[in-house]
Amino acid sequence: MRRARCVAALGCLILLAAGLGRTARAAAQTTTLPAPPLVVELRIDGEIEPVMAEYIDGGIDQANGEGAALILIMIDTPGGLDTAMRDIIRHILDSRAPVAVYVSPAGSRAASAGFFILLSADVAAMAPGTHTGAASPLLSIGGYPITADATLESKILNDATAYLRSYAGRRGRGIAVAETAVTDAKAFTEHEALDDKLIDLVAPSRDALLATLDGRTITRFDGHASTLVLSHPNVVTIEMSSRQRLLDRIIQPDVFFVLLIVAALGLYAEFTHPGLFAPGVIGGLALVLALFGLQVLPINLTGLLLIAVALSLFVLEGNYPSHGILGLGGVVAMLLGAVMLVRSPLTGGGVSLALAIGTTLPFALIVVVLMRVVLRSRTLAPQTGVEALAREVGDVTEPIGVAASTSGTVLVRGELWRAMSTRTIAKGTRVRVVRVDGLTLYVEPLDAPGHP
């Protein structure tokens, strides 16, 4: 019996060990399954300005923190500000994760500052039907390009080409051809860019690009080789935050113009009608937001001056009967100011004519009407307080003499008042209040000669 019990116990131990071994092997197999590679997608869609740079920089930092296998920047831009461009390029060059810049979809472009960003990436790619280049720097004042002297123009071009060579050469790009995009404003289709070694490949879609890059060995900016592992990637798109979207909308020319008009109208209404509070608060907030856009957008000072002239003409129209001439001049001045207000030398974009017309006409009407209401209110007799007694009718309850010592009493609005007059008035006479001096009413009989 003892031997049988020992055999049974040994069998149980063997079965238990076998079960634990299978469990351990299954757990080991489960834990060793590789996670899909993370691809973080960012998008440059529109002009490159500080808000866009903040979004791209933050996305690159977040992707590096999450250990992304690749950062993919989809780009379609006409260009933008030099400072914002250099900020983005600095983050691309310093990124721990490889960065691919892809001009997509068909019909997109990476012009001007976008060309510099494209050539700074570890992998530069374009979709069919796209183009890049036209990267000549523009010197502008008041939003309009100006012609510089030969020395200044040479300095600007040399600085731009040297900056391009400083990183594009280490990426293996065609430097000589790339410089023509700066010096001659040359542009390239996707096939021309590929033939001239400005980009690494042409891919019809994002998925095709990632499939092509899987297993490809690239040389990073610091010189070491890195093999991309992008099999069945987990693509995560990082969008702009709500704050960034709001700021990005503010610096759009149409929105900036509307904010400027709302600020002018709100503050004007508050100054002409003190105590309303709401127009002043709204106008103040709109002014602060407009000042933010003023720092970023290429504002033409002539446009701002024309809008100020238009506001002055609208106010004068409310003051003087010009038969609409001043108002018409204000409308023309505001339309011209709106069209000239924002003019980017990169895109030719500005305030749309439809928005300018749709905003100017109601603005002119409101300002003129407000001014006329203000002027009319100044001619109206007061309706409250002591001053409201002027022109009121009452009855003499005590006779009024000419001398100051023989002042009488009148009953006006059910109240007894001390009264004086330039003539003697008997008790019971109907009188009208001519003026008020403190608590004394100066009255005249209703039947006095020449009295209305």
Image (tube, rainbow, N blue to C red):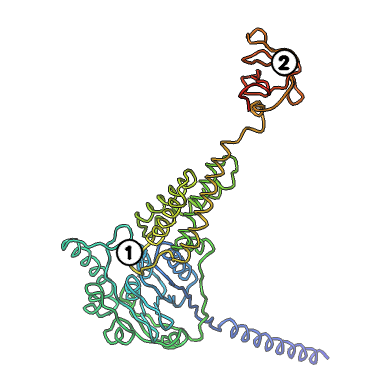
How packed mark 1 is, by other alpha carbons closer than 10 Å (few <14, some 14-19, many 20 or more), is some
At horizontal 32% and vertical 82% (from top left) the residue drawn is 199
Q: Position of residue 374 (x, y in %)?
A: 55, 41
Residues 264 and 309: in front is 309
Residues 123 and 406: in front is 406
Q: Position of residue 148 (x, y in %)?
A: 21, 61
Q: Position of residue 231 (x, y in %)?
A: 48, 86
Q: Nearer the viewer, mark 2 or mark 1?
A: 2
How many numbered discs, if any? 2
At horizontal 59% and vertical 83% (from top left) the residue drawn is 28
- Amino acid at circle 1: Asp
Q: Which mark is residue 409?
A: 2
In this picture, residue 227 sits left or right of residue 390: left
Question: Which of the marked residues, 2 or 1, is nearer the chain's N terminus?
Answer: 1
Residue under label 1: 82
Residues 117 and 428: in front is 428
